[in-house]
Image (cartoon, rainbow, N blue to C red):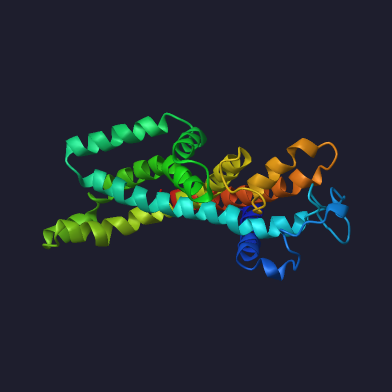
């Protein structure tokens, strides 16, 4: 890895660490109440009192961005974690299942992969109804097929590896060989993919919130804040720009870390 790429990776990790700290301990960064309204201070430009300005209800945008990190990042992490677990289980079992079961599972996966992830998530949340929990479920379902495909491919590759074959020859049961010698390798590959997937999940969740299918007002959530400022963008750009910048920064940092980890994994495997 070149010095420039190493510096970029360190910067991206530092950004993710900062965003994680903001999500876990928002009180360290602001003491303002993100729900406190002040109609006498509506749509005020960024200033020393309000670094990111105020919105249509006079709420502090900086405080709302800080407190919104927990929900926006939390939904992305939850959806990615669930997709990883489901993909690991389904993909690994498909990789060792009889041909008929494997074919059925892969055809269902291919159907979901034929559509953009956001479209799948949009359809699912439209069926389930709006709300943060349903958004997380929708984003999970949309992301699962990619993890299933990778888990199946890794399982089929690792099950014929020399150390797995040696374990089978020594009398290790097939189930134990799968859990002890195959699944750890599959999980490693999925973890690298999940690092990139976190950014995609955060972006998808924010998109659904922007459409009014996620949390509702006055909940501080980046996608919802972005939608709330679109009608006053010409008059008060800060209402949408700062939560939009938070989404962009998080997604870029997660993508950079994920792609570099994947490049390193591919280099080690070659």
Q: Residue at x 62, y 62 (%)?
A: 23
Residue 185 at x, y percent in the picture:
34, 56
Q: Position of residue 51 (x, y in %)?
A: 83, 57
User: 162 or 28, which lies in front?
Assistant: 28
Question: Does 164 sit left or right of 253 as displayed?
Answer: left
Residue 175 drawn at (x, y percent): 18, 57
In the picture, measured across the screen, residue 243 lies left or right of residue 105, that is: right
Which residue appears at 70% of the width and 55% of the height?
Answer: 65
Quick one: 8 or 138, which is closer to the camera? 138
Vertically, is 108 above or below 267?
above
The quarter in which the N terminus is drawn is bottom right
Kindly give the residue lying farthest to the bottom in the view shown: 28
In the image, what residue occupies the spot 71% across and 47% down? 245
Image side of residue 12 versus residue 97, left or right: right
Callout count: 0
Look at the picture and state if 254 lies above or below 21.
above
Q: Quadrant of residue 31?
A: bottom right
């Amino acid at each position: 890895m070149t010095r420039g790429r190493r510096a970029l990776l360190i910067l991206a990790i530092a950004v993710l660490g900062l965003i994680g700290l903001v999500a876990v301990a928002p009180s360290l960064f602001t003491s303002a109440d993100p729900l406190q309204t002040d109609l006498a201070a509506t749509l005020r430009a960024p200033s020393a009192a309000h670094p990111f300005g105020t919105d249509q209800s006079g709420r502090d945008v900086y405080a709302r961005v800080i407190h919104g990190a927990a929900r926006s990042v939390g939904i992305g992490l939850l959806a990615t974690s669930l997709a990883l677990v489901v993909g690991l289980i389904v993909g690994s079992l498909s990789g060792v299942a009889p041909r008929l079961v494997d074919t059925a599972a892969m055809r269902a996966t291919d159907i979901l992969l034929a559509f953009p992830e956001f479209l799948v998530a949009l359809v699912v949340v439209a069926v389930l109804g709006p709300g943060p929990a349903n958004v997380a479920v929708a984003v999970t379902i949309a992301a699962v097929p990619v993890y299933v495909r990778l888990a199946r491919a890794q399982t089929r590759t690792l099950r014929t590896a020399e150390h797995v074959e040696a374990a089978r020859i020594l009398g290790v049961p097939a189930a134990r060989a799968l859990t002890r010698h195959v699944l750890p390798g599959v999980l490693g590959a999925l973890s690298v993919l999940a690092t990139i997937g976190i950014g995609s999940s955060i972006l998808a969740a924010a998109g659904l919130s922007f459409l009014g299918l996620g949390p509702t007002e006055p909940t501080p959530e980046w996608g919802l804040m972005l939608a709330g400022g679109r009608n006053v963008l010409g008059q008060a750009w800060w209402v949408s720009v700062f939560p939009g910048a938070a989404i962009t920064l998080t997604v870029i940092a997660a993508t950079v870390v994920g792609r570099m980890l994947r490049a390193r994994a591919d280099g080690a495997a070659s």
